[in-house]
Image: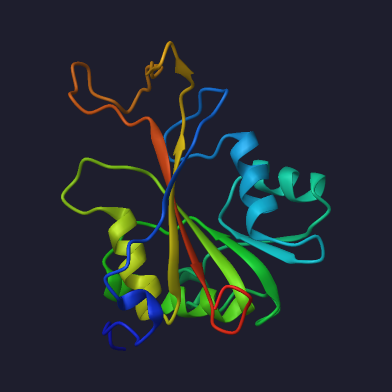
Amino acid sequence: MSLAPPATGDQTSSTVPLTVWPTLTDTQPGAIPPAAAARAIATFSQPDDLIVVIDGPVIIRDAAIHLHRRYTAVSRPTADTGGRAWPSPAGYAGLVIDYPPAGDPQTLLPAFVQTAGLLRPGGILLTVHTPTAGATDPLTTGITTARAAGLRYLQHIVVLTTPISGGRLHPAGHPHIPPGGLVVPVHTDLAVFTTAGGRRD
């Protein structure tokens, strides 16, 4: 399976919009605060849409139910399941929210192709990424893989995971941050993609 990017409109030099969503509650970097979960669903789906969440938290389900969306949760295919596709209606989801695992684009591509197949024409894929100081950027890897799966990159959203106070961010201590570390993550990255054939084309 080739990782050559498809010939779609997002391959031009145009800038992909970057948006910052503030929060009122401290949340672990890589997670989505409750208000942001509701905002994402309200922004990227319609009341009659089916929302599919892949390996996501309960907060997404609660936000979907609150906003009167149809909701289903699925687990990512693994070696234990023989890599079979998840039992969800292909081609019907208006919004898929995915938490891709770490990996290189070649390894992740088959799952991204399956994920793209869940979306209806014009449907939205929202991928959730934990910031890292490692050599590999999960957001960049996800964008590369999603494009190779035939999806168009629409937007990058930075969801703050600590409130703004006095014009500054004051992150709470998290166990995975080494003492004295110079880089303290204070956000979750969301990448927004779409399929062809919708109102955003």
> Residue 141: x, y in percent?
29, 63
Residue 35 image-quadrant placement: top right
> Residue 163: x, y in percent?
49, 21
Q: In terms of depth relative to the viewer, which is nearer, 30 or 84?
A: 30
Residue drawn at 36 percent across, 63 percent down? 142
> Residue 121: x, y in percent?
63, 82
Residue drawn at 19 percent across, 45 percent down? 134
Residue furthest out toward the top: 166
Q: In terms of depth relative to the viewer, which is nearer, 7 or 69?
A: 7
Relative to 136, say whether 66 is above or below: above
Q: In terms of depth relative to the viewer, which is nearer, 65 or 147?
A: 147
Color theme of the render? rainbow
> Residue 64: x, y in percent?
74, 50
Res. 84 in view: no
Relative to 126, say whether 152 is above or below: below
Q: In terms of depth relative to the viewer, which is nearer, 106 or 201?
A: 201
Left or right relative to 43: residue 18: left
Res. 77 in view: yes
- Quarter of the image with the C terminus is bottom right
Residue drawn at 45 percent across, 76 percent down? 151
Left or right relative to 39: residue 78: left
- Quarter of the image with the N terminus is bottom left
